[in-house]
Image (spheres, grey):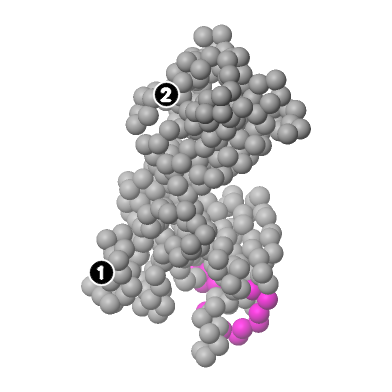
Amino acid sequence: MNLRSDSDWMQLAISEAQKGIGLTSPNPPVGAIIVKDGKLLGKGWHSGAGKPHAEREAIANARAQGNDITDSTIYVTLEPCSSHGRTPPCTEGILEAKITRVVYGAEDPNPAHQGNAKRLLENQRVLVSTNVEKLACEHLIRAFAKKQRTGLPWVVIKSAISLDGRITRPPGEGQWLTSPESRNLVQRMRFESDAIITGGNTIRKDNPALTIRSEQLPNKDQPWRMVLTQGVQNSLPSEAQIFTDQYAERTLVQENGDINEALKTLGNLDCNQVMVEAGGKLLGAFLDADLVDEVAIFYAPLLTGGLDAGFTGLSGKVNLTNQEFTQIGDDVLLRALVV
């Protein structure tokens, strides 16, 4: 493995962290790499709340291979924890392992903990380097960081739109705008979210399941399903899938269309990230309320002439940044952050 710089090794730690995306709430995904004399000795990632953190996984992995990690360097995507929680602090594990250099990318977004690891480790004569691949590491924990700052989850809105700006096809043409490849990716996006939000009209019209249905993804609890309705729960069809399937206990209803209360409820349920899959009116309402952090829009190569235009509830302009365009099957996916 011909890696030389701190940035190179941190990229490998980021690859480890990405294995935990969708599995770690209310914790963030974190990866760690242990290196000595230019050789990779161990690697690890955090796989779920209550399970060992990435640093301890990397230490255990190195020892399982019979590697001596004394005087080694550990690369971690997030500042090591320094307080007792469901697991012991990683700073203690680093000191016990006699690791003499720590490199991390993002600082702990919790102000009560931020910078504590650096001070503690340096007091024990451990060399500490920070902000290596900082932006990439912060991007990994963007949902966790928002939850730490505000108590509210990171909100992604997902939509599929034809080239003439429609979100449905005319009657008799089938349900789907997008390709099978795009629909598979939506399964991954649901997996990465802790809850799916939709509107009462979508439940009445489409009767969606809003579940993860992919054998290629790791096992996890199904996401919470939150229905926002302008009326009361009794106005929704009791026979809808979300009320009658095997995951019905994970269905919630927010009456009177209160978006803020819905997000507070999901935040209190340890949701770091939620995805909104709904009609244009509700998507526009989220954007108008300045409650959207990220958009994922699939553009299908169709001119449908359908009746429903996208984002019909939006009254103002929305600026996007960090735009990424990816071809998915026959479609083009735009992912971007809301400014």
For the question of whether residue 231 can be seen, the reply is no
Q: Secondary structure at mark 1?
A: helix
Q: Residue furthest front?
A: 66
Rendered location of residue 234, percent (x, y)? 23, 73
Q: In front here: 188 or 201? A: 188
Residue 156 percent coordinates (x, y): 51, 56
The answer to which image quadrant residue 249 occupies is bottom left
Residue type, mark 1 in image: Gln
Q: For residue 255, what is the image quadrant?
A: bottom left
Query: Which kind of residue does numbered mark 2 sit on?
Result: Pro
Q: Which residues are magenta?
A: 300-313
Residue 218 rendering spot, x and y as whole percentages: 47, 53
Q: Nearer the viewer, residue 5 or 151?
A: 5
Instruction: Answer whether residue 205 is visible to the viewer in this image.
Output: yes
Q: Which residue is mark 1?
A: 233
- Number of marks present in the image shown: 2
Which numbered marker is on residue 89? 2
Q: Which mark is residue 335?
A: none
Q: Is residue 149 left or right of residue 43?
A: left
